Image (tube, rainbow, N blue to C red):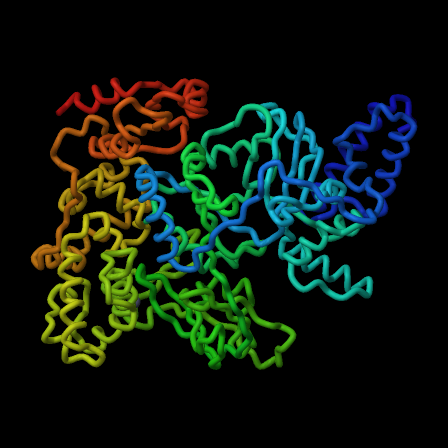
Amino acid sequence: MSGADPAAEAAALRAELERANRAYYELDAPEISDAEYDRLFRALQALEAAHPALATADSPTRRVGGAPAEYLPKARHAVPMLSLDNAFTTEELRDWHQKLVRLDGRVAEAALALEVKIDGAALSLTYEDGILVRGVTRGNGTEGEEITANVRSIGDIPLRLDGSDWPARLEIRGEVYIGRAAFARVNRDREARGLEPLQNPRNAAAGALRALDPAEARRRRLAFFGYQVVVLDGTAPADTHDGMLAALARWGVPVEPHHVVVDGIDDAVAACDGWATRIRDLAFDADGLVIKINDLAVQVELGVVGNRVPRWAIARKFPAESAFTRLLDIEVNIGRTGALAPTAILEPVRIGGVTVTRATLHNEDVIASRDVRIGDVVEVIRSGDVIPKVLGPDRSRRTGAEVPWQPPTHCPFSGTLLVRPEGEAARYCPDPRCPGRAYEQLVHFVSRAGLDIEGLGPERVRQLLDAHLVRDAADFFTLTADTLRELEGFADQSAAALVQAIAAARERPLHALLAALGIRHVGATAAKLLARRFGTLDAIREATAQDLEALDGIGPAISGSLREFCEDPGTAALLDRLRALGVAQEEAGVQADGPRPLDGQILVLTGTLPTLSRAEATQRIEAAGGVVKSAVSRKTTAVVAGSEAGDKLAKAEALGIEVIDEAELLRRLDRAE
Ligand SMILES: [Zn+2]
């Protein structure tokens, strides 16, 4: 590069520096040495100094251009940065939803957006005409500190937004964090420089954001996930929260990838339960999920409580406490779906006020990848009511006497040869009547994810099993107050209450029964789809794999395990017994043999319909065999548009998908009635 064309030279240097930046931050794998980076950087700086017209706002020199500041100026937020209310239990989450439903009936059926709650420092970024102009910390929510120079040093925050559909002025809000691997590197670097290691990634991120020297901010390898768009001037790119996240991704802003939209509170609770044990397995610190009403118009109507917390969002937190103790042994249990569940037997340790003696080790891959050995000192965490789990060993405390664990080849309960399906992390006992599965299956059957029988927790199930009063799920419906009274801990009143709760569970809808049966791959969502489509358990039992897979959302894995379940003589007998004992096997409002004019069709609703509420429209479409989705895709059959339809209408038109009005929807619904 001899400098024949300064503009071309500057462009080449910028491209190379940006690529190096990305490798450094996002991939955590520097492509070029620090010395080489500095050389390119100084070359670009010199070029820009000699030709000021070349110094663009998005030049990488701006990323570390700031000299150390003497103080951080205060900056007011155009729109306050709110904090979120927390739900520490499922009950609190349901209470939040109940309150919203009382405020606005539409919430009952409203889609909910779920995303991982990143444990970092909140940040507001202002873009004008697509160029980053300001970065401000959250501060007290009304006023933060301006840290634009530090923000520019964060390699994965775009200095210029991609695309062109961004509003002229907007704020992007999100969380600055340091990933686990990057944090370990930062501390190794600090130790090499003779500095104290940093305590935890969150404090390190918050401290770096407010560092007076942008070079220190760069050294800490900060990263960013965006989660909100505030339009200051211009047109919103979407009318739903997930639409906004999609817009952020289009503009080159990193978005945490695990966000989903679910149909209602039951699915949200199920998703939270699933995350409670997995949240610490992410590559960065996270302590819960944020649940939001997906529809932005409904959000606005629900509003804010006291200018402080929005009603339309809540953080479901899984606070964790951890302790170190010795792993004495690994016991093998069988989960309700037959998966091998290795359980850690621990030297008793107090965690969060509870003595812990057992913890989950997930599966054999986790044990192998974390190199957990019997005899290790391991870190155990516990959050809420969730089963404690082993995070990993403290290798520095090994004596050499630790023994790696070998998974068994045969089921310790039934002696069956274990199988490991391709691509799965666990071995399974393929015997559906394996006694090892019974306890977990029964606990699941009566839990909230199943028939939701009040007063029947894991301890009670254990007690009933040990007393030989219950061997399979049907046996619950044979219990009488007289037999229960014989058991320890039961009085007249509690025995009668439990019998009553069991009787009430006979009337649960088919989708609850299906989910309760614990058929592999058939969770709450699949159970609902199946119940709404087939209406009765008999219809499902008679359905062929082809019938099942005709349903959007049912693939070969679900249909395969469902067919297997229905064809097994043992489970078939169980289903017959449940019916004989008066357990309903039907979904209300679905006529299996009735006319289903919208069979297999996928509809998306947008805007306000003239006569039908969104809940009514959804209910009628589903009763007619259709499926209502919140987002438009190529699979969408038609979009039903009312007044003030938003970006879904535009997307439908862009994809060439049919758009119909309410009158046409009603005509199609009535076609076969
Ligand atoms: Zn077995």
User: Which residue is located at x 61 percent, y 52 percent?
Assistant: 120
Please name whichever residue, 399 or 577, is drawn nearer the observer in this view of the structure.
577
Where is 438 relative to 178, above or below?
below
Relative to 484, 137 lies left or right = right
Provide residue 283's location: percent of width, then percent of height. 58, 54
Residue farthest to the front, as pictured: 306
Q: Quadrant of residue 142 in the image? A: top right
User: Which residue is located at x 49 percent, y 47 percent?
Assistant: 309
Q: What count of labels does the image hold?
A: 0
Relative to 419, 309 lies left or right = right
The quadrant of the picture occupied by the N terminus is top right
The quadrant of the picture occupied by the C terminus is top left
Where is 349 relative to 614, above or below?
below
Relative to 49, 64 lies left or right = left
Where is 634 relative to 273, above or below?
above
User: Which residue is located at x 25 percent, y 64 percent?
Assistant: 442
Please name whichever residue, 460 or 594, is drawn nearer the observer in this view of the structure.
460
Instruction: Specify the quarter for ligand 1.
Output: bottom left
Please name whichever residue, 447 or 105, is drawn nearer the observer in this view of the structure.
105
Residue 665 visible in rendering: yes
